[in-house]
Structures are given as structure tokens and as C-alpha cells.
């Protein structure tokens, strides 16, 4: 799925090999994406690794206080802009802390997806049904940024297939 929007996923290094990690699925599904690791003691994350371009508007996908909702009004105000979507990956508490701690992200506008259907992620438990997996959040954001509900639907089908297969694999030997 080719997109105009470049996607950088900043993943906590402890998430890389988990079967419940959806950032890896995003990387496999979106050729215009990358995964950058954080939390490594010998190689701390640096915002310079994002390689921000002057022809792209960076936006940070997380519902922090002051985040702007991605919606038609946002798109109208920002038409003709090319975006670089930066997405934290890890536990909810890791993602909240990361934005505050990384000085290089301070000037980047936070955005959030509009309220919608509850997440369909069955691989991890959440205390809030409105929280989304990394992949679900990316698919909803790209559906808006690319002005393509078809892209979002295609990504959600891939997501549902992955979740179903991981669940099946985990329960294959139960009986």
C-alpha cells in the first residue's frame, strides 16, 4: 500500500519480538514506513534519526493534551501539505512518557484520530476500550491523511487477519 504520507514508528526495543506487536505489521504493509528503536541503553533515541524533511509537515500521533483531531476541517486547513506521521509504539505509559522526555519532539504538533468504533485488538488487554493498537491508529490516521477510506479498510482487513491468525496460533494446542 503506497502512501504519500511517510510513517515513522518509534518502537520501544522490548516490543520488537512480541507476537502482539502491530508496528511490525505496519512496516510490512506500508513501503513508505520505518521503525526506529528507543530505550536501548547503549544507543539512545535521537529525533535526528527521523530525518525530517522541509517539504513534509511532521505530526505526532498521540492524544496528548493539546492534540488536534484529524478530521475534514484539519485536512481543509492543511490541504496541499505532505505529512510525516510519527507514531510511538509500546505500552500506553511508555508512549505518554516518551513524548515528554524526547526534546527533539517538543515542537511537533500532536494529532489524534476522531472517536470511532472500539479497537478490535484481542491480543492485549486494555483498561480503556477506546485505546487502539499502533496499527489501528495508523490505519485510521492514514485513512484521513490520504483521504482514502479504502486504504483504511484494506489496512483493517490485514489487521483482522493478523489478529485472527495469532489467536489461532496461540490456541492451536489447547484441547
Image: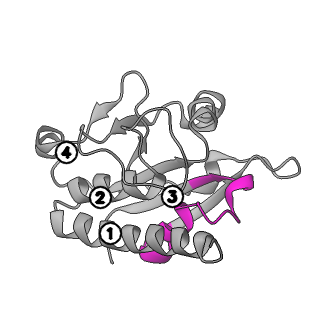
Q: Circle 2 sits in a helix, a strand or a loop, which is it? A: helix
Residue linked to disc 3: 8
Earlier in the chain: of badge 2 and badge 4, it is 4
Gap between marks 1 and 3, in whole Å?
17 Å
Question: The N terminus lies in which quarter of the figure?
Answer: bottom left
126 relative to 23, above or below: above
Gap between marks 3 and 2, in whole Å?
13 Å
- Mark whose residue sits in front, 1 or 3: 1
Magenta residues (range): 10-33
Q: Circle 4 sits in a helix, a strand or a loop, which is it? A: loop
Picture coordinates of residue 173, whole percent (x, y): 65, 76
Residue linked to disc 2: 142
- Mark whose residue sits in front, 2 or 4: 2
89 in the magenta segment: no
Q: Residue at x 56, y 37 (%)?
A: 92
Picture coordinates of residue 68, whole percent (x, y): 29, 31
19 in the magenta segment: yes
Q: Residue at x 23, y 67 (%)?
A: 153
Amino acid at each position: 500500500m503506497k502512501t504519500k504520507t511517510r510513517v515513522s514508528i518509534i518502537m520501544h526495543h522490548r516490543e520488537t519480538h512480541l507476537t502482539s506487536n502491530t508496528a511490525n505489521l505496519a512496516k510490512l504493509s506500508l513501503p513508505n514506513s520505518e521503525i526506529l528503536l528507543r530505550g536501548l541503553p547503549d544507543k539512545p533515541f535521537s529525533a535526528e534519526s527521523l530525518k525530517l524533511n522541509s517539504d513534509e509537515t511532521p505530526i505526532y500521533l498521540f492524544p496528548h493534551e493539546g492534540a488536534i483531531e484529524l478530521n475534514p476541517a484539519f485536512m481543509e486547513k492543511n490541504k496541499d501539505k505532505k505529512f510525516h506521521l510519527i507514531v510511538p509504539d509500546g505500552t500506553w505509559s511508555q508512549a505518554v512518557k516518551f513524548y515528554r522526555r524526547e526534546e527533539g519532539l517538543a515542537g511537533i504538533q500532536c494529532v489524534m484520530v476522531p472517536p470511532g468504533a472500539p479497537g478490535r485488538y484481542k491480543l492485549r488487554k486494555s483498561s480503556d476500550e477506546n485505546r487502539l493498537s499502533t496499527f489501528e491508529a495508523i490505519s485510521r490516521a492514514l485513512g484521513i491523511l490520504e483521504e482514502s477510506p479504502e486504504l483504511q479498510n484494506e489496512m483493517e482487513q490485514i489487521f483482522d487477519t493478523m489478529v485472527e491468525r495469532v489467536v489461532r496460533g496461540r490456541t492451536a494446542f489447547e484441547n
